Amino acid sequence: MTTMTVNAQTPLTNGKANGNKALTERQLLLCTCASFEARGDMERLDTAIRQALEGGVTVNELKEAFSGLYAYTGFPRSLNALGTLQRVLSDRMSQGITDNEGKPWTRPAVWDNAEQALKQGTEVQTRLTGKPFNYDFCPQDDYYLKAHLFGDIFAGDQLSAADRELVTLAALSSLKGVEPQLAAHKAGAVNMGNTKEQVDELCQSIATADAELSWPIGVPNDAYAQYFTGNSHLAPIQPANLEAGAETVSHYANVTFEPGCRNNWHIHHGAHQILICVSGHGWYQEWGKPAIALHPGMIIDIPDGVKHWHGAQRDSWFQHLTTHVSTGGEQSNEWLEPVSADTYDNL
């Protein structure tokens, strides 16, 4: 079966998982570029840069974003992104396009005053983390963080503190193995002036742009939309050895949940349902029990008569195969109340 990549060649602004209501178009364009820089995906970054320039992001804002990200993604990715930006600008200039440089870049004064950089960086770090932070285990890194990252780099005047944190969050969300830093910057992005809704939307948009789904998503699950929070898709499964025009096997299907989507509490009667998780990350919960995090390869056997729900995690697409096995008697689904925002958000 062929793996399908959702939105593989387009920036986050083309995602539809949550309508992109909290972030501005400019913020999404800037964060798209940061996301592809972190992945080292120069092909998609080329496209994202062109759309960012067309959407009002300035050349100097992109320069500051890519240069500052070296502290999180490393110099190689930072320099490659700057090189891609340079090539895009040259190509556009050859086409007669003059891009907006933005406000002139000025050398931060703290670059010439190490003591002031340390003082200013300590204040920025305290604001971002919500309290004073001292990394006594390694004084070298403690100094680098305060004086250089939050001092020298954050002193740039092209991006606001709020936008700089969104750029950082976009990059960290696109890397593996940086969960502690990602969690810290989710909180830090709010402390620096963004809303929780903006942070959640950004993480969902990145998940949408990079979701690799193992099975076709099918068509919008309109017939059951009233029983879902968010968007889901349904793809009936047809055995490969059936001839063209043969009847589709209706009792097997793949259900795809967009980030944050889940079905209502419900009960199966006359059958137990089997879920085979194939892509992304989801949740399954029975009434009165803790939720179970779902990952590819897991199988959930849902007993007849048990109240439950299942769906995607907040920042990931999720797919599972589903079928029902008769336990005798008439089969039916009893749809109940939606999963409350408090229940879902606290997972």
Image: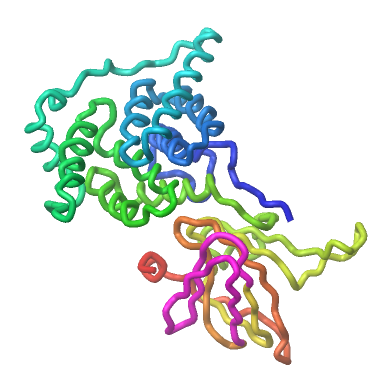
Tell me if residue 19 comes above or below residue 256 in the rendering.
above
Quadrant assignment for the N terminus: bottom right
In the image, is residue 182 part of the stretch drawn in magenta? no
Q: Which colour scheme is used?
A: rainbow
Image coords of residue 20 (percent x, y):
45, 44
Tell me if residue 37 comes above or below residue 303 in the rendering.
above
In the image, is residue 301 part of the stretch drawn in magenta? yes
- How many marks the image carries: the answer is 0
Occupied quadrant, residue 29: top left
Residue lying furthest bottom: 328
Q: Nearer the viewer, residue 226 or 50?
A: 50
271 lies left or right of 103: right
Tell me if residue 179 comes above or below residue 118 in the rendering.
below
191 lies left or right of 44: left
Q: Name which residue lies at 56% across and 31% down.
A: 43
Numbered range of the magenta stretch: 276-303
272 lies left or right of 265: right
